[in-house]
Each structure stands twice: as C-alpha cells, then as structure tokens.
Image: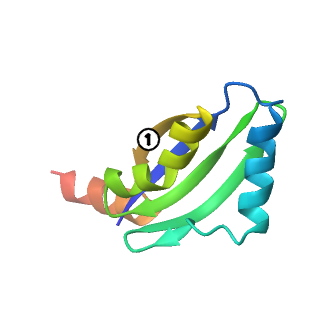
Amino acid sequence: MARFMIHWCAPDPTNEKYTQAIVDYIKGGKPMDEFVGFKMLARQIHPHLGGGVLLVEADNLAAVQKHTYPWTKGLGVTATITPGLSDEEYVDLEESMAS
C-alpha cells in the first residue's frame, strides 16, 4: 500500500450542507474510512480554513478517488492528493540508492 496526503478545501466553509455532511459522516461511523485497498490513518479538520488534511494508505490513486469522490462531486470540495513515503520506505529508498 502507498501513502497519500489529501488536503481538502470547501468552496464555502460556512455552507450548512457542507458542515452537516461532515458531522453526519463522523456520527454515522465514517463508513468510507476503510475498505478493500484503502485505510484512513489520520484526519485533521481545519474549520477556520474550511478544509483539512487526511493521511491515508491506499493500493492506488483510484482507491483514493473512491474515498474523495462523494465530497468533490457532491459538495464541490477540492482535493489535492500528494503521494509520500513512510519513515521506513524513505530509509530503504535512500539506502538502496547509496553508491
């Protein structure tokens, strides 16, 4: 599994439909936080900025899109998806590249 950071931002963070959707998702048990090929590692919500950050593990970008699609398509949220490495992956990579 690969790691991805997802930074999201709402077009209007004061929109009641957007804020209620987040509350309902969390209170509803966060059903899309884990499915085959995808696992949420951390979520940080930034209400003062109208968005937040997710750290996830996923088999591929398609799995990440499966998680973000209802928010981007349904509520107009923008999502910037950045791949990254764990500590161990970074060390392994650096050591494998040493001459």
Image location (x, y in percent) of residue 67: 49, 55
Question: Going by the image, does 50 lie left or right of 57?
Answer: right
Image location (x, y in percent) of residue 4: 45, 51
Q: Quadrant of residue 2?
A: bottom left
Image location (x, y in percent) of residue 1: 34, 67
Q: Pointer 1: what residue?
A: 82
Residue positioned 64% across, 60% down in the render: 42
Which color mode does the image show? rainbow
Question: Going by the image, does 98 lie left or right of 35?
Answer: left
Mark 1 crowdedness (10 Å alpha carbons): few <14, some 14-19, many ≥20: few
Image location (x, y in percent) of residue 59: 32, 64
Residue positioned 20% across, 52% down in the render: 97
| Placement of 24 over or under 72, stated as above or below | below
Hey, which residue is sitting farthest top in the picture? 11
| Placement of 67 over or under 50, stated as above or below | below
- 89 or 37, nearer to the observer: 37
- 11 or 3, nearer to the observer: 11
Residue positioned 39% across, 74% down in the render: 36
- 93 or 77, nearer to the observer: 77
- 2 or 21, nearer to the observer: 21
Question: Identity of the amino acid at label 1?
Answer: Thr
Q: Quadrant of residue 31?
A: bottom right
Hey, which residue is sitting farthest left in the picture? 99
Residue positioned 67% across, 31% down in the render: 10
How many badges with numbers are in the image? Answer: 1
Q: Secondary structure at mark 1?
A: strand
Q: Quadrant of residue 7?
A: top right
